[in-house]
Image: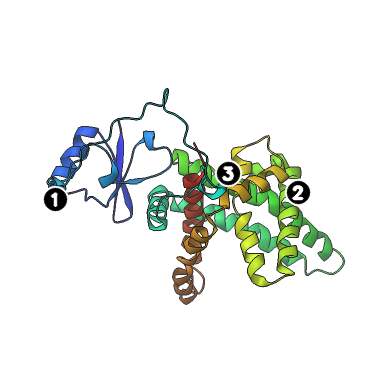
């Protein structure tokens, strides 16, 4: 079985399980370092939480590993409140960000290229929108394609997160579902606007509530706009504050990027997008 581990924000591996134990015994992998294997799905785990990994510093207090779950005969968990259901992001935000950096390792150029391409398209359309007579047409075009671009970028980062590779063409895959993408963008815009008529804060909460819709559409090719928005509301119930805190973690980085005349945003943009992708992956039920 292939294993990967993260040290100082960089992904290492793959290594075999025997080598992984040797790295643990040698102290190369600490209890709080993140490790991953395909059996974990899309979430990296702290090494201390992996059954069978015994750390020298913890040998005296290491509990025996729990017995493997018997999925075939296990009784279903009792139903609880809606926010305690299957949609729960249990991974700490700092670990999601560390996993994002690991996924972007050796892929920064690709992610930055996609960001530059998206910015170039939007900038080009906005530039032409200043031309008299035809400017309105370009403004409408920019608004019409925004949903398709958002859906394509969500699919791009999901594929990059899950397979370790993606392609620039993936960022334009949203145009194959142009109608659904446009309707989703339109409905989200209307709902957020209506909430903002109350106050700014309800509008921000509404934006967070619908934040997973693009990932949901990318994951479900046959789902329509309203179903994706409804699913996003379900997934974010009880998770909105954690998502807000994840975004807030990038505020300091944004201030530093301003000191670089905006050049730093070329790295911050993919970092935020991949971190949000990891949040969705952690939130999504198996």
Q: Are marks 2 and 1 in contact (CB under 8 Å)?
A: no
The quadrant in which residue 55 appears is top left
Q: Is residue 198 left or right of residue 7?
A: right
Question: Closer to us: mark 2 or mark 1?
Answer: 1
Q: Judge whether residue 171 can be spotted in this image.
A: no
Foreground residue, 84 or 285? Answer: 84
Q: Position of residue 164 (x, y in %)?
A: 43, 41
Residue in view at x 65 percent, y 51 percent: 149
**Which residue corresponds to mark 3?**
155
Question: Closer to us: mark 2 or mark 3?
Answer: 2
Residue in view at x 18 percent, y 44 percent: 62
**Element at label 1:** helix
**Which residue corresponds to mark 2?**
183
Residue in view at x 72 percent, y 45 percent: 226
**Which residue corresponds to mark 1?**
57
**Sooner in the amino-acid sequence: mark 2 or mark 3:** 3
**Element at label 3:** helix
**Element at label 2:** helix
Using the numbered discs, state the Cα–Cα distance from disc 2 to disc 1 in whole angstroms: 55 Å
Using the numbered discs, state the Cα–Cα distance from disc 2 to disc 3 in whole angstroms: 17 Å
Q: Is residue 88 depicted above or below 134 in this figure?
A: above
**Sooner in the amino-acid sequence: mark 3 or mark 1:** 1
Q: Could you classify mark 1 by the number of other residues whose Cα lies within 10 Å: few (under 14), some (14-19), or many (20 or more)?
A: few
Q: Position of residue 120 (x, y in %)?
A: 63, 59
Q: Position of residue 105 (x, y in %)?
A: 38, 50
Q: Is residue 58 left or right of residue 165?
A: left
Q: Is residue 184 left or right of residue 27?
A: right
């Amino acid at each position: 079985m292939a294993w990967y581990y993260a040290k100082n924000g960089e992904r290492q591996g793959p290594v075999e399980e025997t080598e992984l134990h040797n790295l643990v015994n040698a102290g190369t992998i600490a209890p709080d370092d993140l490790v991953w294997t395909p059996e974990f799905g899309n979430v990296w785990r702290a090494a201390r939480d992996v059954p069978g990994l015994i750390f020298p510093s913890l040998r005296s207090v290491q509990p025996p590993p729990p017995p493997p779950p018997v999925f075939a005969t296990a009784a279903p968990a009792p139903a609880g409140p809606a926010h305690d259901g299957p949609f729960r992001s249990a991974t700490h935000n700092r670990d999601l960000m560390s996993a994002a950096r690991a996924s972007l390792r050796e892929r920064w150029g690709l992610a930055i290229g996609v960001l530059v391409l998206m910015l170039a398209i939007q900038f080009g359309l906005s530039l032409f929108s200043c031309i008299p007579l035809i400017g309105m047409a370009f403004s409408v075009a920019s608004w019409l394609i925004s949903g398709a671009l958002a859906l394509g970028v969500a699919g791009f980062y999901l594929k990059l997160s899950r397979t370790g590779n993606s392609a620039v063409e993936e960022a334009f895959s949203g145009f194959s579902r142009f109608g659904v993408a446009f309707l989703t963008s339109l409905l989200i815009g209307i709902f957020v606007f209506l909430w903002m008529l109350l106050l700014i804060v309800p509008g921000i909460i509404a934006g967070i509530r619908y934040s997973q819709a693009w990932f949901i559409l990318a994951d479900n090719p046959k789902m329509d706009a309203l179903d994706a928005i409804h699913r996003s509301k379900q997934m974010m119930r009880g998770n909105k504050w954690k998502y807000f805190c994840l975004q807030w973690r990038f505020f300091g980085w944004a201030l530093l990027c301003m000191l670089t005349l905006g050049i730093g945003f070329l790295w911050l943009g993919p970092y935020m997008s991949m971190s949000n992708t990891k949040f969705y992956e952690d939130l999504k039920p198996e």
